[in-house]
Amino acid sequence: MDFEITIIGGSFAGQSAALQLGRARRRVLLIDGGKPRNRFARTSHGFLGQDGQPPSAIMATAASQLARYKTVEQRNGLAMDAVAAEQRFRISLDDGTEVTTGRIILATGVRDHLPELPGLEERWGVSVLHCPYCHGYELDQRPVGVLASSEMAMHHALLLPDWGPATLFMQNAFLPTPEQKAALAARGTAVEPVPVVELLGKSPALEAVRLADGRTVEIAGLFVAPKTEPASDLAGRLGCAFEEGLTGPFVTVDRMQQTSVPSVFAAGDLASAMANATLAAAAGVMAAGGAHYSLIHGIGQ
């Protein structure tokens, strides 16, 4: 089958792009494998009009709304490969079928790699978290911690006192300068040089952490900055340029979410150093506008 625009990835960025293009009456295919990055979170916060809703519920509502647009086809599955072919793209799906398309919007997101620490993975998205704006309020001003894996821990450690008494666990991964220590002290953030070796409490809740010297520190939430990598290799296969972010590589895009490859756009966590539901949705809208504009003016392939 042939489409004007194919969107690969159906979370907030992909669905937002599909909605704009459906309203433009463009022939659109939205492909989604059903494993969004936010599937570990019970609720989404800070997303205007959706605060406190489960991410799966938000996406289900969006899918039902997209179904009203007759030019938008939603398909469950994975895009396994994408190649340029005769001024268009040929996309191979995991069910053995192929589609052709004039434009591609990549919204495939990223995959998180957590530090190796007993008890961390099973609490991810509930009491082990990455964004205080998304989940800090629900910790109800109880003690919180930052598990350092890079210099980004400094950013978390300065933010967190607004959500509760904070401790920076250095983990032999980050050594604050004297100036940084002064800034942390001014914010009331404690600095703990002894590494955390275990998380305590009935999972997925968190009550405390155990340190290498046997001491325990009470905390209700632990913030980490996991390493990230693209969840799909399609951007690389298509030849898109990448740049290095604080947690991992992301696709380089211009102000209209155009990648370095003509007619290929990218949105959401795949194409941003900052992960946030609102930013992902906004980037999807922008990518849709960029792809639509390129079709109208014949820009690209």
Image: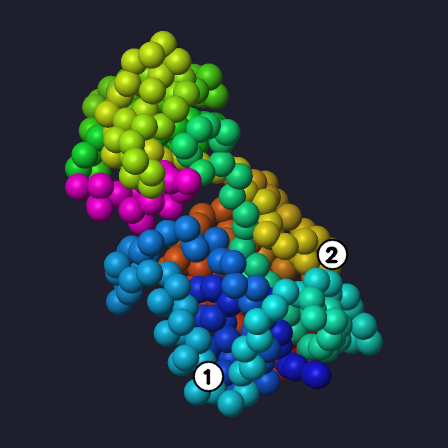
Q: Quadrant of residue 155?
A: top left
Q: Quadrant of residue 260?
A: bottom right
Neighbor class of circle 1 (other Cα within 10 Å; few <14, some 14-19, many 20+) is some
Q: Is residue 263 left or right of residue 50?
A: right
Residue 231 screen position, x and y as percent: 59, 52
Part of the protein shown in magenta: 122-140
Residue contact between numbered discs 2 and 1, judged by CB atoms under 8 Å: no
Q: Mark 1 — residue? A: 67
In the current view of this chain or complex, which residue is farthest to the front?
Answer: 202
Closer to the eye: label 2 or 1 = 1
Residue 85, which numbered label? none
For marks 2 and 1, the one nearer the N-term is 1
Residue 237, which numbered label? 2
**Vertical side of 157 occupied by 100: above or below:** below
For the C terminus, the quadrant is bottom right
Element carrying mark 1: loop
**Vertical side of 256 occupied by 158: above or below:** above
For the N terminus, the quadrant is bottom right
User: Label 1 amino acid?
Assistant: Ala
Number of numbered discs present?
Answer: 2
Is residue 139 among what the camera can see? yes
Element carrying mark 2: helix
User: Label 2 amino acid?
Assistant: Arg
The residue located at (29%, 46%) in the rendering is 135
Q: Nearer the viewer, residue 8 or 211?
A: 211
The residue located at (54%, 87%) in the rendering is 71
Is residue 292 among what the camera can see? no
Neighbor class of circle 2 (other Cα within 10 Å; few <14, some 14-19, many 20+) is few
The residue located at (26%, 21%) in the rendering is 217
